[in-house]
Image: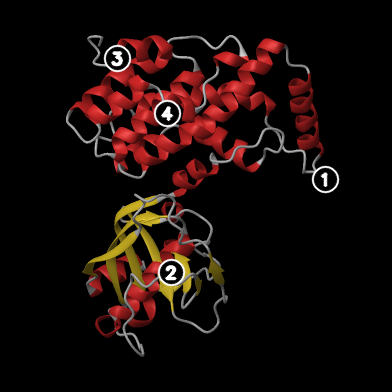
Amino acid sequence: MTLATGLPESLVEFLRQPVNTPEDRVEAQDFVRRPDVRELYRDTLGTPRADKMLAECATLFPELDLNRASLLALFCGSWVEGGASPRIAFTAVLEVLGRALAVLRPYCADEALEDDEEAQAAARQARERLDSLTPAQSLLVDSVHPAVDLLVLPLMTMLMRSRENHRDFLAHGELLHSIDAMVKSNTTLPFENLHFLDHAAALTYEDELVVVLPATRSGLVVSAQGINCNFHAFSLLQPLLAAHGERLGLQVAAPVLAAEVPREDSAQYLWLQAFAFEKGEMVNSLAWAWGEAPLRSNSRKHGRCVLIALDTAEGVSRSWSGFADRLHDAHQPSVELVRFLSAEEVAAYLQ
């Protein structure tokens, strides 16, 4: 029998069950083996019904125990992987993650920071909270902890398929702070997957990133999509500059395709931010575009994110590796030429 929601009645009844004992917890592998789940998956995956199912699930999430909600979220991720809209259930699943992290955050701290008294005090408090849990509290923590890592899977699926989802994700400042803290400063209750969301938060999407080359008074505007950090941007931009070297007035031996991103790379330019130049002259040689920082963190001029590629032997020699990794199968980082800057535009960006 199926409810008006379109979800099987047996499945909705299961999802609404509370988790009052350890036996009430259900693992993902057991959930997907349920006959009603298998049948629903078979009948809806890759069909127009999947979007309707996602909408119904979004309304159901707020009333579910976090264990059950994480299982349903995983199913929603499967629909999205099959072609359903990544937008429909994203906010609802993100709210489930927020609920889960709020439960666990009091028990998360970093015991490894031995030289930080404040951090050590926080770690002692977190450990004391964990050690003094009542059976009911322990059940809740033991249930919610794996739910967080499970929730990361559908959230990444939805984030990597929608710039709008990524924009909305960045608007949740408190949640992002919790994710970052519980990834980077947490040894008492560590997670296996949560760091992927921390990396996803650092991604940058710029439709018009400006790159200026002062030495040749040239530059270009590029579309930079899904960029992990500045190092990643440099790795993609340097081959693009080489490929258009003649037009940009560069001395290059041979064009290199932008798609040929090496696993290890080094700076061919001293990469600076916009405020390094004023009135056409360099005024701050230390205005670096820091490699590990998000691309969007660079200063903006005339409403656009700007990078200055300074061709100088006096610059800092930097090398890096591992910053070009794809976070997900649907993560497709790229830089593509939009247009070349005019001489007037180059002068304006160096003012």
The answer to whether 260 appears left or right of 265 in the picture is left
- Mark toward the start of the polypeptide (3 vs 1): 3
First reached walking from the N terminus: tag 4 or tag 1: 4
Residue closer to the observer: 111 or 221: 111
**Dot 3 corresponds to which residue?**
8
- Asked if 148 appears above or below 225 in the picture, the reply is above
User: Could you tell whether 177 is left or right of 13 in the image?
Assistant: right
Q: State the residue at coordinates (42%, 28%).
A: 94
Q: Residue at x 30, y 71 (%)?
A: 347
Q: Alpha-carbon neighbours of circle 2 within 10 Å: few (<14), some, or many (≥20)?
A: many
Q: Please name the amino acid that badge 4 sits on.
A: Leu
**What residue is pinned by disc 2?**
235
Of residue 166 and residue 4, the one placed in the foreground of this image is 4
- 6 relative position to 113: left or right: left
Mark 4 and mark 1: Cα distance apart in space: 35 Å
Label 3 CA crowd tier, 10 Å (few <14, some 14–19, many 20+): some
Sequence-wise, which precedes: disc 2 or disc 4? 4
**Looking at the rendered structure, which numbered label has been put on residue 115?**
1
The numbered mark, 4 or 3, whose residue comes first in the sequence reads 3
Q: Are marks 4 and 1 in contact (CB under 8 Å)?
A: no
Quarter of the image with the N terminus is top left
